[in-house]
DNA sequence: CCTGGGATTTTCT
DNA sequence: GAAAATCCCAGGA
């Protein structure tokens, strides 16, 4: 297992839907001092443009959603239902609102005895915090598990020391391993409710919902 | 498999 | 005052 490599600016400058699929299999890394919480992204949803009724941006720019109109590679974090935070990654160019919601992670330290995961941790050279199984299979749950809250809203993942994405160049998720489906929790979105803009790794047991 | 309600608080009208 | 990019639990088919 080679050391993980941080994803650079160019990675975030792809088309939103290509990027959504490219995010599957990448690693979300949260550093708190010398400790690390991390997991492999296994499920995402795309929110795209001004017309998408499911997107916060569909009713124009506000104090909350202004990050969505900013630069790609930045974290957009908001509170939902008074109890949870959701993490999104901004895509496209400045002034075009689009983002990808991170919906589920395969945690890397829930079975410390598993040799593959230990190898990743050792290669990363830092202490790992523990996440229990089932703590990262949903957008609100994974933010709670990785201690992601509004203080990280606007964090630039290309340069941040606290929150970023990385890849193992040997891991490549093929299109044939990806399932697309309708997005979750957007009954109010009219015809956009039926857009197949949710993407997840087929047969992965850490996704939030079949 | 499905549907519905409660928790809880920020955001927008 | 209502809605919300969630989660968990209960109940019915």
Image (spheres, coloured by chain):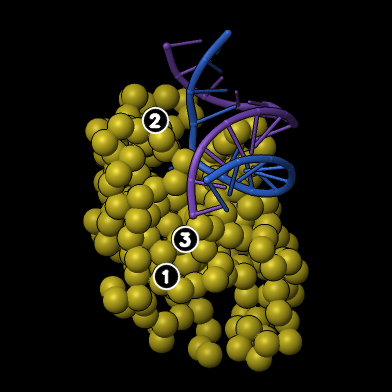
Chain colours: A yellow, B purple, C blue
Residue beneath the point at 62% across and 70% down:
A107
Local packing at callout 3 (Cα closer than 10 Å; few below 14, some 14-19, many 20+) is few
CB atoms of marks 3 and 2 within 8 Å: no
Return the mark for residue A210: 3
In percent of width and height, residue A14 lies at 26, 59
Local packing at callout 2 (Cα closer than 10 Å; few below 14, some 14-19, many 20+) is few
The subunit carrying tag 3 is A
Q: Is residue A4 visible?
A: yes
Give the spatial CA distance, label 1 vs label 3. Answer: 11 Å
Query: Of callouts 1 and 2, which one flags the residue occurring earlier in the amino acid sequence?
Result: 2
Q: Is residue A48 above or below residue A40?
A: above
Give the spatial CA distance, label 1 vs label 2. Answer: 26 Å
Give the spatial CA distance, label 3 vs label 2. Answer: 21 Å
Mark 1, residue position: A201
- Left or right: A59, with B6 as reference point: left
- Left or right: A24, with A31 as reference point: left
């Amino acid at each position: 297992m080679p050391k993980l490599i941080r994803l650079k600016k160019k990675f975030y400058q792809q088309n939103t839907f290509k990027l959504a699929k490219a995010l599957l299999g990448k690693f979300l890394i949260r550093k708190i001092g010398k400790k690390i919480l991390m997991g492999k992204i296994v499920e995402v949803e795309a929110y795209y443009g001004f017309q998408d009724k499911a997107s916060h941006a569909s009713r124009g720019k506000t104090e909350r959603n202004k990050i969505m109109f900013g630069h790609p590679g930045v974290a957009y974090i908001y509170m939902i239902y008074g109890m949870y935070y959701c993490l999104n990654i901004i895509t496209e160019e400045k002034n075009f609102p689009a983002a990808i919601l991170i919906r589920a992670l395969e945690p890397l330290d829930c079975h410390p005895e598993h040799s593959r995961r230990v190898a990743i941790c050792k290669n990363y050279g830092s202490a790992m915090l523990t996440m229990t199984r089932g703590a990262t299979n949903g957008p609100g749950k994974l933010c709670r598990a990785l201690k992601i809250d509004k203080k990280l809203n606007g964090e630039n993942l290309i340069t941040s020391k606290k929150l970023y994405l990385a890849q193992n160049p040997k891991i490549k998720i093929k299109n044939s391993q990806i399932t697309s489906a309708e997005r979750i929790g957007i009954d109010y979105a009219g015809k956009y409710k039926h857009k197949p803009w949710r993407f997840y790794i087929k047969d992965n047991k850490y996704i939030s919902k079949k």
